[in-house]
Image (tube, rainbow, N blue to C red):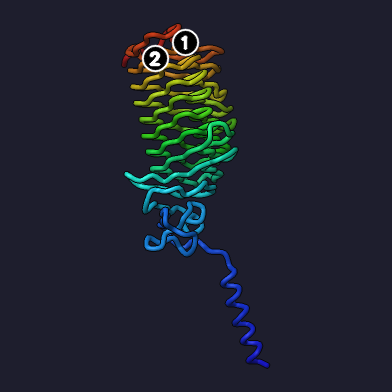
Amino acid sequence: MRKIMLLCAAICATVLVLAAPARATSVQTWVASSGADTGSCTQTAPCATFTYAMTQTLSGGAIGCLSSGSFGSITITGSITIDCGTGQEGTTTCGGSCTAIDINASSTANIALRHLNIKGIITSAGYGINASMAGGTLTVQDCTISGQGNAAISFAATSGRAQLIVSDTKISNNGDGIIISPNSGVIVSTMLDRVQITTIGDVGLWLNGSGTIAGSLRQSVIAGSADYGIYATATGGVYFTVEESSVIDNVGVGIAAFASGVNIGVGASTLGGNGTAVDAASGGSLVSFGNNQMSANGSNGSFTPGGPGLQ
């Protein structure tokens, strides 16, 4: 009898082990177009999707791509790097009213997305990256985001202080380009460098919400929006600089400061082909550093008098 009981216990333990969900075991995991969603996503036996690879990746670890391929949409809740590497393209697609990369992360999260092609269908109400951050940092580098019916990047900050960094990224043919919207009492720091936002349904860059936004747009292009190129309405205050950038061919206003406490400085930039180049209203301040180029606008509009000029 005792032998039978021991045998049953051993069998049950084996079944439980086999039935237990896979657990993250590695700091570095891999996906490939020829991969399969089994095992630990090693370099010699890569997986097929970002979602499965994440189950095998420890918090703060990284998912790499061994080849170009389509690796599915993903939900992120903690620190992770997804990097398909220079010269390769990791595609994540949202085919309907969905989000290609959905982020709901805590204050300690450090998320980096690099070398990705994020695609949607413009007729559907989808998002490329839809992030809700309770603090933490989101970095988007050398990515392309296109075809989203809603925003290419929506960055909502719910508490504390959050950071959004976007560089060397091309955003085209979306309902909106980048929307930043902190809650009341929340601060978002943002650095947008060498970003192209083109052919937008409504707004290229929308500084929105009831919190505070501080940052800059540098060496970038915002063009072809049906309404605003840069639209600043955050009621908690905006402290933003546009430098060495082009805001062109926007049907409505190139740069609009439309809330009390909005402060935007513009230097060494080109504003051309807009319905109105610059417009400050409702207590907003939009100042020139005195070295901008304005041409071929329906109206140039007016910078706020008494700007700092060149320092």
Residue 53 at least partly seen = yes
Q: CA distance from mark 1 to mark 2?
A: 9 Å
Residue 276's disc is 1
Q: Is residue 296 above or below residue 227?
A: above
Q: Are marks 1 and 2 in contact (CB under 8 Å)?
A: no
The answer to whether residue 150 shows anywhere in this view is no
Residue 299 location in percent, x, y?
Answer: 45, 6
* Residue placed under numbered mark 2 in the picture: 271
- Categorize mark 2 by other alpha carbons within 10 Å: few (<14), some (14-19), many (20+): many
Q: Is residue 55 left or right of residue 142?
A: right
Figure check: 209 above or below 256: below
- Could you tell me residue 15's position as x and y percent? 60, 75
Quadrant into which the C terminus falls = top left
Badge 1 element: strand
Q: Name the residue type under label 1.
A: Thr
**Mark with earlier residue (1, 2):** 2
Say what secondary structure mark 2 lies in. strand
